Image (spheres, grey):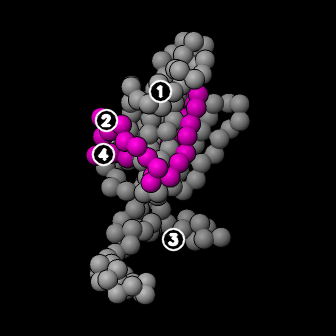
Amino acid sequence: MTLKGAAAAARLARENGLAFAGMEIASGSGELVLWADGTRVDDEEQAPDTGLPELDAVLSGSRAIVVRPGCRRYEIRFTSVVMHAHYDEGLHVPEDHEDFSTPLRRYTDSRFLRFLKDETLADKLLDEPLLHYRIAMLNDIIDVAATTPPDVLSRVLTVSDLWMMDD
């Protein structure tokens, strides 16, 4: 089942974890498309063998976070992008008012927007206010400044989707 618009965005907001699946930027058009996959905890316990008994004891019985058939793929399409940033989640400094309850976050005041105002001409050249969206994933953070909200589509992943990812 494919979800669109508000239904897809609501489903995305309830995801516990997302895995980065790709991004495409249309040069000069202001369009950015991001794909993110919902995740789940694997059924199988891990049997670590790090060579460090203390670490193995801590990791023993843990379960991997995986993308499997039945998880959802989200297509998040921005059509009026002014700037974007893609970086490792380990480098992320949260906003003072960061909402950790959802992977798709919207800000009207943020360091990212202040940087745009202070270091670019966007604030002076654009008629529309800039919106800051953050997509927080398990290993990646993507910040997007745009003048309109994104369109969100969602569909269930199949075995063939995941088989194609391995190529």
Residue mark closest to the camera, 2 vs 1: 2
Q: Secondary structure at mark 3?
A: helix
Would you say the residues marked 1 and 4 are in contact, meaning their CB atoms lie under 8 Å apart?
Answer: no
Cα separation between marks 4 and 2: 11 Å
Give the quarter of the image for residue 60.
bottom left
Please report whichever mark, 2 or 1, sits nearer to the chain's N-terminal start. Answer: 2
Cα separation between marks 2 and 1: 14 Å
Q: Which residues are magenta?
A: 76-103
Cα separation between marks 1 and 4: 19 Å
Cα separation between marks 4 and 3: 30 Å
Residue type, numbered disc 2? Asp
The disc label shown at residue 100, or none: 4
Cα separation between marks 3 and 1: 40 Å
> Which residue carries the number 2 mark?
96
The disc label shown at residue 87, or none: none
How far across and down, in percent of the image, does residue 27 sit? 71, 36
Q: Residue at x 53, y 25 (%)?
A: 116
Please report whichever mark, 3 or 1, sits nearer to the chain's N-terminal start. Answer: 1
Residue type, numbered disc 3? Val
Residue mark closest to the camera, 1 vs 4: 1
Residue type, numbered disc 1? Leu
Give the quarter of the image for residue 72.
bottom left
Q: Nearer the viewer, residue 16 or 139?
A: 139
